[in-house]
Image (tube, coloured by chain):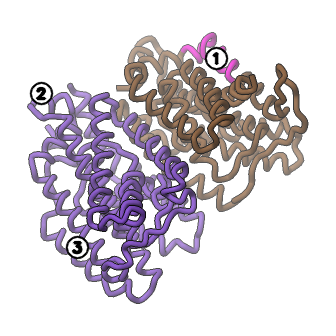
Amino acid sequence: MSQTTPTSGRVRDGWGRIIAVVSVAGGLAPFPAHSRHLAGVLALALVFAVYAVAWNLLFGMSGQLLLCVGALAGVAAYGCAILADDRGWPLGLAVAVGIVAAAGAGAGLAWLAVVRRLGVLLVGVVTLVASLAFANVLLAARAHTGGETGRVVGTASATVLAHPVGAHLALTVVLAVALIVYRLVAISRLGTAARAVRDDPVAAALAGVDVVRTNVAVAALAAALIGLAGALHGLQEGFVSPGTFAFGHVDVRVLVIVMIGGLGTTLGPVVGAAAVTILDELLRPLGQLRLVVYGAVLLVAFLGVRDAVAVRIAAWTRSARRR
Amino acid sequence: MSVLVDGVVTGAQLAVLALGFTLMFGVAGIVHLAYGQLVVVAALVASLAAAWGAPMALAAAAGVAGAGALAWLLDVTVLPAVHRRDGEARVLLGLLVTLAVAFVIDGLVVWWRPYTVLSLPVGGSVDVAGVTVRTGSLAGAALALVALALVGVALRFTDTGRRLRAVGQDEVGARLVGVDPRASRHVAVVLGGLLAGVVAVTRGLATSVGAADGFELTVLALVVAVVGGLGSVGGALAAGLLLGLVHAAATQHLGAVYTTLAMLAIAVVAVVARRGGLMETEPR
């Protein structure tokens, strides 16, 4: 049945294209050395490409509308900063703990969603509320987080991340890891199970798929990738603040990137991240009107194009309704 | 006592905010993420009308009408594709399309009038049961209560209201007894827009509405509506009152950050614990 849906088991982008895209990203490495502005723009593009690949794993493949990418990244970044800077832990260990914390949070939310059978909409609502709660926790725990102004992350100054080219290459490696994880999941039993659960949880369960385990495993993997990118982003910037991980800044942008790039495709999120980065730079003079352009582009993506998001969503839920 | 009075004053406003949002979802199946932007547009229209020299009541009416008109305009231009689908597909597509619309409105409003806030000045204060309340807040709450009563009566006792409730409960069943679901969904969306306009006026009376408040207002509406059970009119009223009281109590004892945290926590607990009550109204 899922063979007929636009986002069926076909895995369109093979290893060759992944290597090509990562090579292009790595090939841009000399540029960050030239200007601080360019270094910042490229680093942000890479970080958001990783967020988008991971979120696409969550929503595109697994149908889990977790709207807390920024919060998960923030958990890892703040955790890493607090452990490494304030507690004096080794940096590697602090990053690892941050990633595990993000993965745990993602897995916990996914578990809650499946066990309480929340449905796509309520999952979105709960995770959106969780994102806003996280932002408020950051404000409340001022002693550790620096509150509204944020805090410095100093540890990275002794590592490769302190150099713009080194940071760019490190983030490129993370993007490569994210794409490899996505494709490995896509072609594995886990990917097949995730798509089956997305299309029809009841049918998947009847066919022997462990729904809880599938969704929790996908969410943990995606959240770990988000945490890794978030922690490195904090280290590379040398500074984290609530704004860095705000819902309006991260999650909305990730949604735009994935929807423009292509929901449920391997490389779409990377293309989307590049497109949004370039659009951002081109439209900078427009100021607030940038938002209008994004809104219009999204409307076209949602309503105008054949085989667009609307058709895909309809295809997913059509199979669910036939039961 | 002051918590009670403040709570009811805040709660009435939250209830109107949630009512418009929950009607759009319950009847039309649309999670209108541009709802807060409708409030902002209403505030903008009202403040422009006031700047043109319209008396306050007329400016407020213009704001309400403006929000209703915009909701209708959106419903006939970008939302038909959403109305054509049903079940979860409609909810998801509606969510995405209205988010894009929210971007467009936010961008235009903040670009055109970055600071314009609607503030309807009503001076002085009144004693209510020994508690001093600002006249503006009280007028806002009174207006909110009137709007709630009007919508409640209309839903219960008029034919249009009965049709709205029928479509909300069972679209297929409603069609079988001769109700046109499309027409009822249009009515619900426009009614939601008008209520967004009322929110702008009540907030303008109590505090103010800023050009960039759209997102915050949408989230607030979502939180209150979810606590009451998405799509449930009675739930929206109860949740508005409950959260108003929580808000008043927490503001007095905990401070702003913990107040927000408490309200968000209530929302999460409500969704996770009361899923059964919520799912009944969710289209499948």
Chain colored brown: B
Q: Name the residue under label 2.
A: A206
Q: Name the residue under label 3.
A: A22
Q: What element carries label 3?
A: helix
Q: Main secondary structure of the magenta part?
A: helix
* x 88%, y 33%: residue: B125
The answer to whether A158 appears left or right of B134 in the picture is: left
Out of B146 and A208, give the one closest to the viewer: A208
Q: What element carries label 2?
A: helix
Spatial separation of the CA atoms under disc 2 and disc 1: 45 Å
Residue A295 in view of the camera: no
Out of B16 and B81, give the one closest to the viewer: B16
Q: Where is residue B75 in the image (x, y as percent from the top left)?
A: 54, 39
* x 62%, y 38%: residue: B254
Q: What residue type is labelled 3?
A: Val
* x 41%, y 22%: residue: B274
Out of A160 and A81, give the one closest to the viewer: A81
Disc ID at residue B152? 1
Q: Where is residue A252 in the image (x, y as percent from the top left)?
A: 45, 54
Instruction: Place residue A48 in its image quadrant.
Output: bottom left
Q: In which quarter of the image is the C terminus of chain A?
A: top left
Mark 3 or 1, closer to the camera:
3
Marks 2 and 3 belong to one chain: yes
- Image: magenta residue range: B148-162
Please tell me which of labels 2 and 3 falls first in the chain: 3
Marks 3 and 1 belong to one chain: no
The answer to whether B256 appears left or right of A210 in the picture is: right
Q: What residue type is labelled 1?
A: Gly
Spatial separation of the CA atoms under disc 3 and disc 1: 59 Å
CB-based contact (under 8 Å), mark 2 and mark 3? no
